[in-house]
Every structure is written in structure tokens, then in C-alpha cells.
Amino acid sequence: MSRQPLLWLTLVFALGKGTLFDFHVIPTRQNFQNGESLCRGLGYDGLAIISSPEIYRYALQLTKPVRTNNETCGVYVGLRRNPQTHMMTWDDGSSSAEDSPWFANVSLYPKLHYGVMHRVGNLASSHGTWEQYSLCGNHNNLPTKALGVTALGQQPDGVSSSLSVVKVPSYLECVLLCGRDYRCRAAEFNSDLLTCMTLGPGSYTGLTANGQSQTFVRNGYF
Ligand SMILES: *[C@@H]1O[C@H](CO)[C@@H](O)[C@H](O)[C@H]1NC(C)=O
Ligand SMILES: *[C@@H]1O[C@H](CO)[C@@H](O)[C@H](O)[C@H]1NC(C)=O
């Protein structure tokens, strides 16, 4: 990590529809399937997809009253084990990010098929039969807000792989691109090349000086 001073800025970008987050907490307890049905009955697509760090943190706040209300109950979310890949997968088909805040290693519990936000806030897998609260949400047009800081004159170092490298006109476009991918954890804009490189969890080791670069470092799940 370079010792050069960073300019710490908080950037908030909201794209698309008026409501950033349209979630609903069902404050009564039922199993996963019934929670999902209740959500559909209320006009939601189902249980909420909280795949990006920003959505997750919002859901963490929103569900806090019910999670702290009953020491045994968490909140069902739109996450379940894919029968083919056996991976915990969001209901819009996206895989859970590598840095997902799991309560325990889900690979060790292959018989637990349903996703829940544990009462302490981490994500966990569950039998789905226990009566818990539910968080409803829609599955399309998920919020693309990205929160993070800008490192001026810095580029990612030790990059092992990237999510995408595309031409963009500006740094802001590059940040917006990062917000649109729930896996993006950093995005580097090069003002000479007009390129934007987005990086997933754990795919770089730090930052290093480059006068032509600005890097957006997105806040993680906590
Ligand atoms: C989780 O468990 C699997 C299977 O035992 C193992 O391969 C993997 O390394 C574990 N992951 C972590 C983060 O401990
Ligand atoms: C917490 O939830 C469990 C399971 O539904 C229920 O049996 C228990 O009575 C609840 N406790 C409180 C204090 O509401």
C-alpha cells in the first residue's frame, strides 16, 4: 500500500427508479416457503435479494428491530442452494459474492438449502422449516448505489483478475459501472486510456501511485 495521501470522499450514486430500496419486513414468524408466499401476496417478487454491500447494509438496519426482538429468530432472504451447482444463489440467479458475510462456512452444511439473515446480521443457511421473520423485495432493477472512497493518483496493485475492462468517458462512469455489479469492490479509471477496470473481492493486494489513475474503493459488507 502506497503511503501517498488519499483523498477520502464518499460517493453516492443512484440510478434508475425513484425508490432506491423497496423492501418490506414481515414481522411475524413463518417458515421460508410461507414467508416467500406472504411476500408474493403483498406484490413483491419474493424474498429480498441483498447481494451488494450497500443493499446488505441497508437490510441489516431495516431488520434490526425484528432480529433483536427475538433471540432465536433471524430473517429469511431470497437466497437458496442451487440444485445443480450446490452453491447458495440469489433468487435472481446471481451467485453469492466471495466475500459474503457468512455466519459459518456454508459448504460444511450441504443439507441446509435456504438463506437467512442470522439474528447477529451475518448470512447463514437454514433448513427453512424454523419459523423466522422474512424480508420481501423485488428481483429486478436492484439498486445500483455504490458507496466508497476515491484514491486520487492511485491504481490497484497486485491485480490477479478483473471483472471487466471497458472504455468510459469519465471517472464517474467508472464508479457507476462498479455500482451496477454487486461483485465489484474496486474500479480504476485511467484518464490517459479512458479505461475502467472493475475488480472483484480479493483480486488485488493494495494501491500504488499512478498519476493517470483514480481508483474507487467500494465499502464492503460491514
Ligand atoms: C469451507 O469448507 C470447504 C469444504 O470443507 C473448504 O474447501 C473451504 O476452504 C472452506 N472455506 C473457508 C473460507 O474456510
Ligand atoms: C421466538 O421465536 C420462537 C420461534 O418462533 C418462539 O417459539 C418464541 O416464543 C419466540 N420468543 C419470543 C420472546 O417472542
Image (cartoon, grey):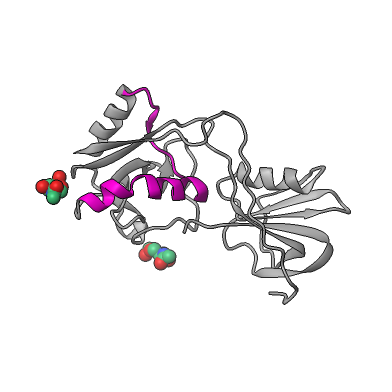
Q: Which residues are magenta?
A: 42-69
Residue 176 sits in quarter: top right
Q: Is residue 206 left or right of residue 57?
A: right
Q: Is residue 67 magenta?
A: yes
Could you tell me residue 25's position as x and y percent?
Answer: 32, 37
The N terminus lies in quadrant: bottom right
Tell me if residue 206 can be seen: yes
Q: In the depicted view, which residue is nearer to us: 76 or 126?
A: 76
Could you tell me residue 139's position as x and y percent?
Answer: 46, 32
Q: Is residue 46 left or right of residue 68?
A: right
Q: Residue at horizontal 32%, vertical 60%?
A: 108
The residue lying furthest to the right in this view is 192
Q: In the depicted view, which residue is nearer to us: 197 or 138?
A: 138
17 is higher (above) or lower (below) than 74: above
Could you tell me residue 153's position as x and y percent?
Answer: 79, 64
Q: Is residue 193 magenta?
A: no
Could you tell me residue 100's position as x and y percent?
Answer: 45, 55
Q: Residue at horizontal 61%, vertical 30%?
A: 16
Residue 157 sits in quarter: bottom right
Residue 91 sits in quarter: top left
Q: Residue at horizontal 31%, vertical 47%?
A: 116
Tell me if residue 86 can be seen: no
How many marks the image carries: the answer is 0
